[in-house]
Amino acid sequence: MHPDSMPTEESSGNSLASDDFVMAYGGGPAFPHHVKLQPSDTSFHYHGMTVRDWFAGQALPAVVSSLAQSNGSFQGSMLTDLFGPTATNIRREQIAAALAYSLADAMLARRDRSI
């Protein structure tokens, strides 16, 4: 399970997912959810997906559309930037995911600068 989707038990003080990890690598939780179980009154906090994951998912349709229109002709420098100079046999799915997360990272960086 990805650390961002793991619950944190608040009543006992045990942390099953690190808030610092979520903030540092994902821009914070996108859809946090708090659950209180009855009758024990144990509380759980679910971080849900990160803002980074949310941004990447929102960018993905445009990325896939753009890749489909390119008919497989990708700039060599773009592939090198995304995967490094020694990467070979890169599939379209890998390119789409890398581009979507690259856009998400750019959005998070821009958001952090404008605060």
Image (cartoon, helix red, strand yellow):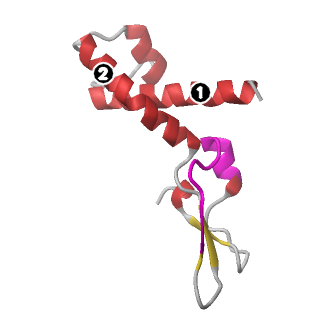
What's the residue at 59%, 27% (across, down)?
107
Q: Residue reaching furthest bottom?
A: 39
Direction from residue 55 to residue 90 in the image, left or right: left
- Residue 27 image point, x, y percent: 64, 41
Sooner in the amino-acid sequence: mark 1 or mark 2: 2
Q: Which residue is mark 1?
A: 107
Q: Residue reaching furthest right?
A: 115
What's the residue at 51%, 35% (across, down)?
55
Circle on res. 65: 2
- In this orientation, which residue lies closer to the viewer: 71 or 41? 41
Q: Amino acid at mark 1?
A: Met
Residue 59, picture quadrant? top left
- Residue 67 image point, x, y percent: 30, 19
User: Can the viewer see residue 57 in this picture?
Assistant: yes
What's the residue at 37%, 8% (across, down)?
75
Residue 46, picture quadrant? bottom right
The kind of secondary structure element at disc 2 is: helix
Magenta range is 20-35
Residue 42 located within the stretch drawn in magenta? no
Residue 43, picture quadrant? bottom right
What's the residue at 40%, 17% (across, down)?
79
Circle on res. 12: none
Q: Amino acid at mark 2?
A: Ser
Q: Is residue 28 above or below residue 44?
A: above
Q: Quadrant of the C terminus?
A: top right
Residue 27 located within the stretch drawn in magenta? yes
- Residue 65 image point, x, y percent: 30, 21
Whether label 1 touches label 2, CB < 8 Å: no
Q: Residues within 10 Å of mark 2 (few under 14, many from 20)?
A: few
- In this orientation, which residue lies closer to the viewer: 56 or 92? 56
User: Can the viewer see residue 95 in this picture?
Assistant: no
